[in-house]
Amino acid sequence: MDQLSYKTRFVSKREHQKSWYIIDAQGLTLGRMCTKVASILRGKHKPSYTPHDDAGDNVIILNCGKIHLSGNKWSQKEYLRYSGYPGGQKSIIAKDLNVKNPKSMIETAVKGMLPKSPLGKQMFRKLHLFEGVDHPHAAQKPVTFKLD
């Protein structure tokens, strides 16, 4: 037998088909939704997935402020940030952060699920968040993605 037939063939960057998906976050649990979104951004839902290449698709998330958190997380979950100076650590609970900036909860969750590398930053740039139902990406003809 010919040994060339056993060689693994990787899909090049030009051969990846990039799609656009819309997800309506209203009533969806934050963590469960973000794991699916991170998987789509990485391209793990495609048979042509390769870990060292950006094969993922673009994701549009609508109604970011209407997500759901289970249990008492609205009053107990804290988001920390640190300025780098002594005494510069600040915290905010999920309920207040959702009022102040609803997109940041989803950004933080998805960014934590992507690789910590330049490739992960490139994948994160394909995430588009909107607080309402209007978005400027209608020309890309996005397809509704069902999270079941």
Image (cartoon, helix red, strand yellow):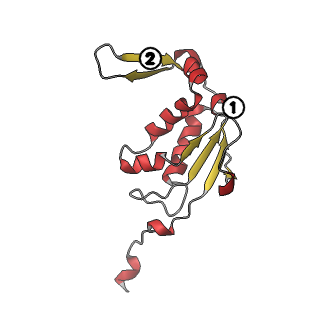
Amino acid type at circle 1 is Gly
Q: Is residue 11 above or below residue 49?
A: below
Tell me where residue 12 appears, x and y as whole percent. Answer: 44, 68
Tell me where residue 69 appears, x and y as whole percent. Answer: 60, 25
Q: Is residue 130 above or below residue 14?
A: above
Disc 2, SS? strand
Residue at 59% x, 23% y is 98
Q: Which numbered dot is residue 91?
A: 2
Q: Indicate which label's residue lies in the foreground, 1 or 2.
A: 2
Q: Quadrant of the C terminus?
A: top right
Q: Which numbered dot is residue 27?
A: 1
Q: How many other residues sit within 10 Å of disc 2, few (<14), some (14-19) or many (≥20)? A: few
Residue 94 shows in this picture: yes
Q: Is residue 90 above or below residue 63?
A: above
Q: Quadrant of the N terminus?
A: bottom left
* Sequence-wise first label, 1 or 2: 1
- The one of 55 and 132 positioned closer to us in this rendering: 132
Outermost residue, bottom side: 1
Outermost residue, left side: 86
Disc 1, SS? loop
Specify whether 89 is left or right of 67.
left
Amino acid type at circle 2 is Ser
Tell me where residue 45 appears, x and y as whole percent. Answer: 55, 55
Residue 72 shows in this picture: no
